[in-house]
DNA sequence: CCCGTTGCGG
């Protein structure tokens, strides 16, 4: 065997090292042969320790070096980057610059990546401008890193500027733009980016495809989703867990749960995230029971649910008011997970929707990390429960923190006033929102204001309000107004509003019921008959509301004309007694406008059992 | 030669 010169032998040896002991032996040899002083070899030693995850040993070598070249600094910086220690990366970067060592492409790339992961746009841009000064403006690696920095900071428009200036764009730079647009809620542009990449003749991979699939998921276009899925099969893409999980999620999120399950079922390797994708699909589409079943099933298959799975499970409990399971989920979190903002807010929401406002508030006070959405959720909870004063008190408390209220906060606050019938307060805070917080009111805010005025019988004012603004006036605004017209016998305005509603072609049967009830109030019997015909034609796209009660941990669902409950007779008896007692103290039920359509109700019942159980 | 882009949630 021919002996190589020392440095080359050591380099070969280092490359074959897979454990700490063998690296340490080479390390000793390097000391003996005095090759450690060689700038290109000490960097390799640091990189070897880093490769096996031993950052501590790498740092010891680094610290003992008499002088450090770019490669040594880079090796150490990359080591910290691999271990996901962005602040260490930045501190080394700054030390290196202070030592007068000139960073290279690799240094800038990794340093900017660290800023992206800490969402520190300011330092990131500072480093980027230094990179430009050092002549790396046209570098693909540094460029992609900057694209990601802007994408993660929600500055896609800045990313576009950098991207368009890049002379050479490769798979990673295109992919960064795709995922950037997806994460910024601009899925159409993500799809356009994918098409642009195809036109440039750059072959896609699993990562870029994951971005495209996520774009399809947020577009909710089944035809596009199916064609993308078909495209990747035709092109023979090797699908890994991530691609398959994003596919299952794409179908599940948009309610195509059979397709989602088919993808999931055929996955050779699944993990907790794949399960989470399915669970969230079921939970978000109203299949609460199925979501909770899958949570149990995943544990049976040996997977530990993570916080995202629990968030979906809590959402499922909220939807059906299943307090018993909600409490189990809470207990599970206390035992095995750490509370973050998302998980905390989901538990708060669950307690609130399951009727336990005090638990919700106690949790809100306990959760250390509360963000904007946590505050909004708690304010919403008070609103739903009719506690407008508490909602306002919380809002005022919020203004003392550094979290700024957003459009959703005001929507919750205004809705709280509308539920409590506090017209003056509502008007006052609407004004504050517009003038002090410079928040442009949207459809939701106008709907609250219309609801507030219309409930109080000030239908004319509400009508004037919506006619005075130029914003998009959607269904909710008109529905709130018509409900007011119905309750306060305002037939002339109501007729105009009813026509507007019908022009919008809603697919909610409840809206048609409201219009029909309004016509009945106005004694427009021909229109009532038309409405009934229309409802029959349109079929049952939307499931009507039903009540759910939890008794001893078991759910009982009720809807109109439903006689299937085992204690139906007893329940009716008690209801009759309550009805009798209420009339005795002066209650006059307004059931003269109630709508009956027994054929539809039958199909509703079928769906009810699928959904709740 | 190294460095940049990925899957579920309030």
Image: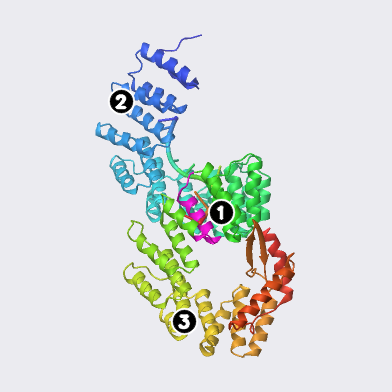
* Marked residue nearer the N-terminal end (3 or 2): 2
CA distance for labels 3 and 2: 76 Å
| Marks 3 and 2 share the same chain | yes
Q: Residue A456: which disc?
A: 3
Report the front residue among A161 and A529. A529
Label 2 sits on residue: A68
Residue A471: % across, % down: 43, 75
Q: Nearer the viewer, mark 1 or mark 2?
A: 1
Q: Residue at x 68, y 46 (%)?
A: A265
Q: Is residue A482 visible?
A: yes
| Marks 3 and 1 share the same chain | yes
Of all chains, the one bearing label 1 is A
- Per the image, is A424 magenta? no
Residue A154: % across, % down: 40, 54
Query: In the picture shown, does residue A439 fall above or below A456?
Result: above
- Identify the secondary structure beneath mark 1: helix
Of all chains, the one bearing label 3 is A
């Amino acid at each position: 065997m021919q002996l190589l010169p020392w440095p080359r032998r050591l380099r070969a040896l280092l490359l074959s090292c897979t454990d700490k002991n063998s690296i340490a032996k080479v390390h000793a040899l390097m000391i003996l042969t005095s090759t450690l002083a060689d700038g290109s070899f000490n960097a390799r030693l640091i990189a070897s320790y880093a490769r096996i995850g031993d950052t501590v040993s790498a740092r010891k070598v680094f610290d003992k070096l008499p002088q450090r070249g770019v490669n040594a600094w880079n090796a150490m910086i990359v080591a910290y980057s691999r271990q996901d220690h962005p602040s260490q990366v930045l501190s080394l970067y700054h030390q290196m610059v202070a030592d007068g060592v000139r960073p290279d492409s690799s240094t800038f790339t990794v340093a900017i990546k660290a800023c992206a992961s800490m969402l520190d746009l300011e330092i990131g841009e500072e480093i980027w401008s230094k990179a430009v000064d050092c002549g790396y403006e046209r570098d693909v690696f540094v460029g992609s890193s900057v694209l990601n920095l802007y994408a993660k900071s929600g500055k896609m428009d800045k990313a576009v500027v950098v991207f368009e200036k890049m002379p050479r764009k490769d798979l990673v730079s295109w992919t960064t733009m795709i995922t950037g647009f997806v994460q910024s809620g601009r899925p159409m542009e993500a799809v356009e980016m994918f098409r642009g990449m195809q036109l440039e003749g750059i072959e896609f991979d699993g990562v870029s495809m994951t971005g495209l699939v996520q774009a399809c998921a947020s577009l909710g276009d089944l035809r596009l989703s199916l064609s993308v899925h078909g495209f990747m099969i035709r092109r023979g893409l090797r699908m890994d867990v991530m691609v398959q999980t994003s596919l299952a999620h794409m179908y599940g999120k948009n309610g195509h749960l059979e397709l989602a399950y088919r993808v999931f079922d055929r996955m050779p390797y699944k993990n907790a995230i794949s399960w989470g994708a399915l669970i969230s699909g079921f939970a978000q589409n109203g299949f609460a029971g199925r979501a909770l079943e899958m949570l149990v099933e995943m544990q049976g298959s040996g997977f530990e649910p993570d916080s995202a799975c629990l968030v979906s499970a809590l959402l499922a409990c909220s939807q059906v008011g299943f307090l018993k399971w909600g409490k189990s989920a809470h207990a599970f979190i206390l035992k095995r997970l750490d509370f973050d903002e998302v998980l905390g807010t989901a538990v708060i929401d669950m307690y609130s929707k399951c009727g336990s406002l005090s638990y919700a508030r106690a949790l809100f006070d306990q959760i250390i990390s509360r963000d904007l959405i946590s505050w909004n959720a708690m304010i919403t909870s008070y609103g739903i429960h009719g506690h407008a004063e508490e909602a306002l008190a919380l809002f005022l408390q919020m203004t003392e923190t550094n979290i700024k209220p957003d459009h959703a906060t005001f929507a919750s606050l205004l809705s709280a006033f509308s539920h409590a019938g506090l017209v003056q307060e509502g008007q006052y805070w609407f004004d504050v929102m517009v003038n002090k917080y410079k928040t442009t009111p949207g459809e939701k805010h106008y709907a609250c204001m219309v609801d507030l005025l219309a409930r109080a019988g000030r239908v004319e004012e509400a009508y004037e309000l919506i006619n005075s603004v130029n914003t998009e006036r959607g269904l909710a605004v008109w529905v709130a107004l018509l409900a007011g017209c119905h309750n306060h016998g305002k037939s002339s305005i109501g007729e105009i509003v009813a026509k507007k509603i019908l022009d919008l072609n809603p697919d909610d049967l409840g809206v048609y019921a409201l219009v029909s009830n309004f016509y009945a109030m106005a004694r427009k019997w021909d229109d009532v008959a038309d409405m009934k015909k229309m409802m029959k034609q349109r079929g049952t796209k939307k499931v009507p509301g039903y009540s759910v009660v939890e008794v001893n941990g078991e759910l009982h669902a009720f809807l109109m004309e439903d006689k299937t409950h085992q204690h139906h007779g007893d329940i009716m008896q008690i209801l009759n007694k309550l009805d009798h007692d209420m009339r005795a103290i002066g209650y006059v039920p307004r059931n003269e406008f109630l709508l009956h359509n027994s054929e539809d109700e039958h199909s509703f019942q079928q769906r009810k059992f699928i959904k709740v159980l």
